[in-house]
């Protein structure tokens, strides 16, 4: 770390500390102290992995549990839709006013026990069962989509928290070095070897980093609250520090992602089922023009007369079809057309969203590689050169500060690009309906 004397005597260890900044796959520098007005540095805590959080969310998230219960409820209704209506049992006494008492000598006096069963026109129950099955499939797909949505949101919140945590570590470390630089500039100014502008420039940059820390801290609180919401925890429940992870790779082209979406997209599968349900509903509405039947059987108990048996067959007559069956059929056809248009709209939207996310992912991927392999090493070398030139009087203090801040910016942008890449990948997984990192 910079000593509090003229930069002319900067030890080699400090140069290595500055130019040996973290990269995507290595451990970061330990965060240093900060000024009293900056957010307090968090105490050391256990690290958390994305896998651990995903497991908790899948088990505890109420939206996932609610959608699962809804899927079970729809599945249980399939059998009821396929079943005949409940039969009707009739108990009737024909005779005396007193229930059950028959009139002697009257052949029409009897106790009647009857049963009647409604029988829909052939094919109606089968169609109702198919519609119920499709609705159960839709609800199951909605449950799958809800689960994937929660997973995608949790991944995005995790990568946001990872970005904020790394950024705060970088800023805190650099603030400590800036404070040392400010003290060096102030010391040189006091002994007449420097100018006041150097010390003021360092203090200004320290204040800017304090502002940056405050904004990052706000983002940290928001990201932690979002994660806790998805885990079904209180918003201020403590979370560990996001663990380092290996950057994922996008192994699919845009065309391959579009094909995966057509095969696995839950949203598109829901639209397909809705079209199928619309087709079955149209068929059921057309069956409404045909009559339903009722079959009944009666037993007549007559004390002094022979027992009698009887049966009956009834049929409904769709007499008012132009006011009932025809509008129902038209409504079903309109709903089917709407479902087809929604399927088409979903297909177009999927292609558009996948293309946008693919562009973000590929651009962020290239940026991460550019920062890690070119810009960070070049900026480190530039800072090393500025330090060397400053030591021999060939560069001024402002050049040194600018080189130092340039390294901080490319480090921060490298992690920002990494976070953008992982977030875009998580959103793409939601759209295509499959894991893209396996």
Image: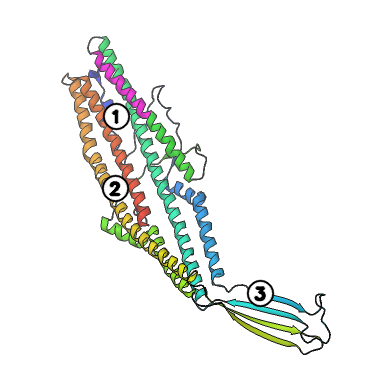
Q: Secondary structure at mark 3?
A: strand
Residue for point 27% across, 10% down: 190
Q: Nearer the viewer, mark 3 or mark 1?
A: 3
The residue carrying pointer 1 sits among few (fewer than 14), some (14 to 19) or many (20 or more) residues within 10 Å by Cα, namely: few
- Residue 394's disc is none
What residue span does the magenta drawing correspond to? 194-213
Q: CA distance from mark 3 to mark 2?
A: 65 Å
Query: Residue 340 location, x and y as percent?
Result: 37, 63
Residue named by callout 2: 361
- Verify whether residue 210 appears in magenta: yes
Residue for point 22% across, 20% down: 397
Residue for point 50% across, 55% down: 67
Query: Residue 278 location, x and y as percent?
Result: 43, 66
Mark sitting earlier along the chain (1/2):
1
Residue named by callout 3: 88
Q: Quadrant location of the C terminus? A: bottom left
Residue named by callout 1: 17
Give the prevailing secondary structure in the magenta stretch.
helix
Query: Residue 284 location, x and y as percent?
Result: 47, 72
- Verify whether residue 51 appears in magenta: no
Can the viewer see residue 172? no
38 up-or-down from 144: above or below? above
Q: Nearer the viewer, mark 3 or mark 2?
A: 3
């Amino acid at each position: 770390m910079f000593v509090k004397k003229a930069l002319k005597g900067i030890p080699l260890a400090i140069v290595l500390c500055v130019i040996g900044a973290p990269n995507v796959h290595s451990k970061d520098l330990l965060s240093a102290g900060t000024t009293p007005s900056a957010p307090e540095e968090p105490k050391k805590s256990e690290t958390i992995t994305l896998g651990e959080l995903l497991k908790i969310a899948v088990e505890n998230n109420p939206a996932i549990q609610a959608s699962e219960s809804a899927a079970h409820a729809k599945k249980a209704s399939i059998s009821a839709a396929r079943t005949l209506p409940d039969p009707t049992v009739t108990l009737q006494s024909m005779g005396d006013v007193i229930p059950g008492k028959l009139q002697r000598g009257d052949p029409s006096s009897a106790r009647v026990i009857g049963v009647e069963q409604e029988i829909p026109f052939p094919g109606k129950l089968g169609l109702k069962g198919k519609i119920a099955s499709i609705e159960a499939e839709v609800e199951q797909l909605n449950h799958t989509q809800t689960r994937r949505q929660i997973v995608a949101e949790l991944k995005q919140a995790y990568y946001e928290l990872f970005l904020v945590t790394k950024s705060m570590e970088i800023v805190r470390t650099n603030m400590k070095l800036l404070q040392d630089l400010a003290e060096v500039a102030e010391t040189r100014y006091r002994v007449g070897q420097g100018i006041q502008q150097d010390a003021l420039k360092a203090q200004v940059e320290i204040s800017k980093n304090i502002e940056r820390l405050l904004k990052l801290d706000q983002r940290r609180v928001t990201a932690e609250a979002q994660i806790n919401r998805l885990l079904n925890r209180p918003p201020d429940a403590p979370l560990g520090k996001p663990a380092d992870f290996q950057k994922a790779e996008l192994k699919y082209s845009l065309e391959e992602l579009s094909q995966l979406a057509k095969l696995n997209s839950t949203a598109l599968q829901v639209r397909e089922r809705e079209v199928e349900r619309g087709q079955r509903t149209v068929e059921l509405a057309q069956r409404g023009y045909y009559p339903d039947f009722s079959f009944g059987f009666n037993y007549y108990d007559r004390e002094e007369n022979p027992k009698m048996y009887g049966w009956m067959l009834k049929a409904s007559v769709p007499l008012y079809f132009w006011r009932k069956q025809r509008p129902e059929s038209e409504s079903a056809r309109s709903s089917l057309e709407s479902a087809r248009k929604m399927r088409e709209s979903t297909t177009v939207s999927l292609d558009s969203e996948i293309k946008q996310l693919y562009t973000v992912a590929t651009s962020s991927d290239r940026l991460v590689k550019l920062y890690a392999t070119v810009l960070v090493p070049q900026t480190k070398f530039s800072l090393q050169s500025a330090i060397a030139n400053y030591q021999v009087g060939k560069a001024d203090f402002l050049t040194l500060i600018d080189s130092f801040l340039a390294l901080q910016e490319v480090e921060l942008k490298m992690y920002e690009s990494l976070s953008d890449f992982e977030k875009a990948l998580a959103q793409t997984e939601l759209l295509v309906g499959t894991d893209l990192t396996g």
